[in-house]
Image (spheres, coloured by chain):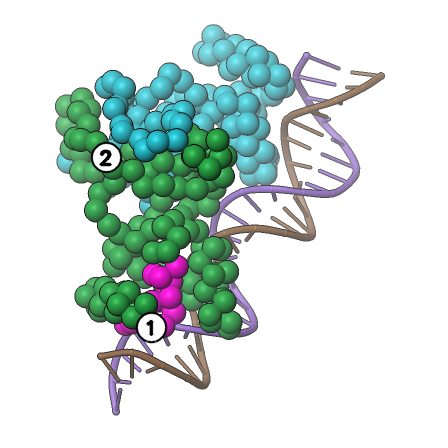
Chain colours: A cyan, B green, C brown, D purple
DNA sequence: CTCTATGCAAAAACTTTGCAGGGAT
DNA sequence: ATCCCTGCAAAGTTTTTGCATAGAG
């Protein structure tokens, strides 16, 4: 849909990055899939950009990571996945199919840190079995 | 110390793995350092086993991971680190120096999962600044 | 028009594999 | 004696880089 296209374009421009069709397509793929690894993005985008280079996908992932437009999720037993940066949330990872699901962080988790540790960010990851795999 | 050496040897035997000097040394390095990546292990162990192969380090890491003797910690912005498997705990990662610290999980964190999701394991990672970097 | 992004190819970085000899049980 | 482990070299994977051309602002 056109609206979405504009959203991605503006998102890029806000971060002082050029809005290219390839980047917009990558964001579209991430938005639709939720969480995707490099190979997924590459295979999807090839459907529309037949001659796109894997190097371009890597470069854009790194560029958009640097700009904070997307984020990396390091998942146990699989390659890193990427998602569009959104409000703070946690992840549920299915240990059967590898799918990643967003879950809401319930509340500030009260962790007792030793003296001198200054927390900035907390992330919770829950491993388990998802509905489709049960 | 001999005691430690025996511990590692027994640990390996319990898991039906052969106790070799290289493996024992790797466990010693992990025990002393707490959390180390492949390169750290390799560089440390080379001090005692001058001709050890990087391939052996990889093989042993994978073997001991498979046996559950050690665990992989996927850290943001750096290579995976490994630690000897111990009681359940969480990690604090310093975003300045990259050091990983063990912290105690305070209590069962009550996360509300949607219908059909079956949680098995939860892990908490806190990013921030450690005492030495402040 | 200027400067960044793309595509391609090559290089670098990282990890695994195959095999012969050595070592643990 | 058997079978696993080690070290070496080679192969496989994954990611980055350099450069010429194309494209965005």
Q: Residues within 10 Å of mark 2 (few under 14, many from 20)?
A: some
Give the vertical position of B106 relative to C2 (above or below): below
Q: Which residues are magenta?
A: B18-30
Query: Quick check: A102 above or below C25?
Result: above
Task: Point out the frontmost of discs 2 and 1.
Answer: 2
Question: Residue A77 at what x, y percent from top left?
Answer: 33, 45
Picture quadrant of residue A35: top left
| Residue B101: x %, y % from top left | 36, 41
Judge whether residue B12 can be spotted in this image.
no
Using the image as rendered, state which of residue A3 and residue A127 is in the foreground. A127
Residue B57 drawn in magenta: no
User: Horizontally, is A53 left or right of A75 in the view?
Assistant: right
Closer to us: C2 or C14: C14
Q: Residue at x 32, y 33 (%)?
A: A114
Tag on residue A42?
Answer: none
Would you say A60 lies left or right of B42 here?
right
- Residue visible at 39% across and 53% down? B33
Left or right: residue B104 versus residue C18 is left
Taking D4 as reference, is A134 above or below it? above
Measured Cα–Cα span from mark 2 to mark 1: 34 Å
| Chain containing mark 1 | B
Residue furthest out toward the top: A3
Main SS category, magenta section: helix
Secondary structure beneath dot 1 equals loop
Crowding at mark 1 (Cα within 10 Å: few <14, some 14-19, many 20+): few
Identify which residue is drawn at 26% across, 67% down. B3
The answer to which image quadrant residue B93 occupies is top left
Q: Which residue is mark 1?
A: B20
Circle 2 chain: B
Residue C16, position as x, y percentages in the image: 41, 59
Q: Which mark is residue B105?
A: 2
Q: What is the quadrant of the N terminus of chain B in the image?
A: bottom left
């Amino acid at each position: 849909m056109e609206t979405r296209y504009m959203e991605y374009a503006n998102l890029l421009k806000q971060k002082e990055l050029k809005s290219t069709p390839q980047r917009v397509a990558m964001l579209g793929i991430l938005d639709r899939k939720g969480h995707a690894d490099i190979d997924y993005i590459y295979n999807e985008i090839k459907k529309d950009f037949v001659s796109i280079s894997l190097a371009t996908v890597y470069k854009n992932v790194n560029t958009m990571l640097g700009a904070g437009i997307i984020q990396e999720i390091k998942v146990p037993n699989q390659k890193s996945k990427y998602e569009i940066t959104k409000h703070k949330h946690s992840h549920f990872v299915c240990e059967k199919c590898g799918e990643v699901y967003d879950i809401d962080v319930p509340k500030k988790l009260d962790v007792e840190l030793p003296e001198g540790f200054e927390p900035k960010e907390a992330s919770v990851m829950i491993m388990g079995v998802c509905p489709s795999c049960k």
